[in-house]
Amino acid sequence: MKPGGAAMAPLATYKCLHERPKMSDAQREAISRASNPQNTLSELLAQLLMARGPGGQEDEVREICLRTITPLCDETWVDAAGNVIGLIKGKRKVTESRGAVRVMAHMDEIAMVVKSVNEDGTLRVIALGGANPVNFGMCPVDILGDNEIIPGVLSFGSMHATQNAPQGADVLSGDVHWNDVHVITRYSPPVLRTPGVRPGTRVVLSRHWREPFRVGDAIAAHFLDDRAPLAAIIDAAQQLSHRRDELACDVYFVFTTSEEESNAGAMFASASLPGETTVAVEVGPVMDEYGTKLSVDPIINTGDEKGYYTRDIVTALAAAAESCGYSPQYALLVDFASDASAVLGNGSSARAGCVAIPTENTHGYELILDGAVRACSATLCEYLMTC
């Protein structure tokens, strides 16, 4: 029963819209279009942005990555951690053996996870990854039950509350915490058991709000972190697939899981794949504090909260950007981390670097300039050609 005593709408009302199929015909057609080399980078990015991928449940993103990378690589597979891996083998003969390079971009996004189901059917949620309620705002959400996907709304409560209300003081001051918010489902706890909603269920921004938005010479959307870098490494793989004879090293493109929460996918891949060098492709915050600007010029990360990147890789990435006609932006991103710094920090990679796409509003409604993804992929390709 809903508050006030009236019966809640039966779950079947929404089942036809939110039932979890393995993959709809429309999705398969979209993924097929994205895997066609003739389609543009922006079309691929749009498909990636529409896919839901909370940490540990990146299935929709994984299918796009696997389908797009497979025609470009010598070998592709999904490992035990759920990472998609594509191998392009270098064919250029060199006198000194070159070690393999692992290129990483993560498939997961910041999201929420159910902490508890309240008696009125609302859900208490906490962050999955580095998120605060303001990163999402009051918004439509998709609740990824074990059996079905159902709709919900992330609520901060009424803005007409006073400071006497339990959550009023925090909300009215703008200092909103996870204990101030809840997800409205309009179902009772017994009904929620049918779609498989429980503690641990992932909650993500609804597809209703995922479409990219054009802003002059820029594109804005939630989850450009890390869908823009995913598009960049797919584009890099496409370029390298035509230049194998010039490539002296083997390149493992690794589409990782659970970066936002623990870097678990990257750590597993780094420990199990050949090579001693890892390069992460990321979004980079545009901030006066770091001296970074919104432009197409790639950010070359020199270090972050998990450590400092390998000096010769930093300089090689910058030189690659310059060779492609860009002005690299060196930055020490103190409040930041990547798959590469994580595997460098845990000792599973001897060397690491990070190239990033300049991005406004990181972990929010993010924005990048046209050409920034291609600038990143071109820089990455140039770097790999010199390894």
Image: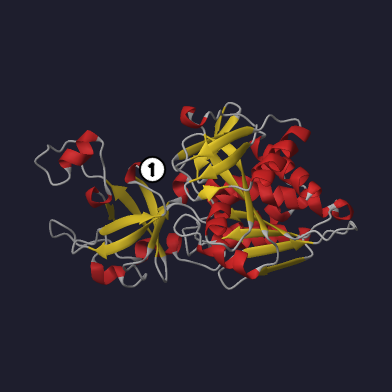
The residue located at (48%, 45%) in the rendering is 336
Q: Secondary structure at mark 1?
A: helix
Which of these two is toward me, 312 or 131? 312
Q: Is residue 85 above or below residue 176?
A: below
Q: Is residue 225 above or below residue 98?
A: above
Which of these two is toward me, 94 or 177? 94
The residue located at (45%, 44%) in the rendering is 209
Q: Is residue 365 left or right of residue 300?
A: left
Pointer 1 local density, CA inside 10 Å: few below 14, some 14–19, many at least 20: some
Q: Is residue 292 above or below residue 121?
A: above
Q: Position of residue 194 (x, y in %)?
A: 34, 73
Q: Position of residue 369 (x, y in %)?
A: 60, 32
Q: Position of residue 340 (x, y in %)?
A: 58, 53
Q: Position of residue 127 (x, y in %)?
A: 36, 54
Which quarter of the picture shows residue 187?
bottom left
Q: Is residue 260 left or right of residue 88?
A: left
Which of these two is toward me, 63 or 372? 372
Q: Is residue 164 above or below residue 269?
A: above
Quadrant where the image shows the N terminus: bottom left
Q: Is residue 290 left or right of residue 325?
A: left
State whether residue 328 appears in this view.
Answer: yes
Q: Is residue 206 left or right of residue 51?
A: left
State whether residue 220 appears in this view.
Answer: no
Q: Residue furthest left?
A: 164
Marker count (numbered): 1
Which quarter of the picture shows residue 326?
top right
The residue located at (62%, 32%) in the rendering is 329
Task: Specify the amino acid type for callout 1.
Answer: Asn
Instruction: Name the residue beneath numbered marker 1.
Output: 135
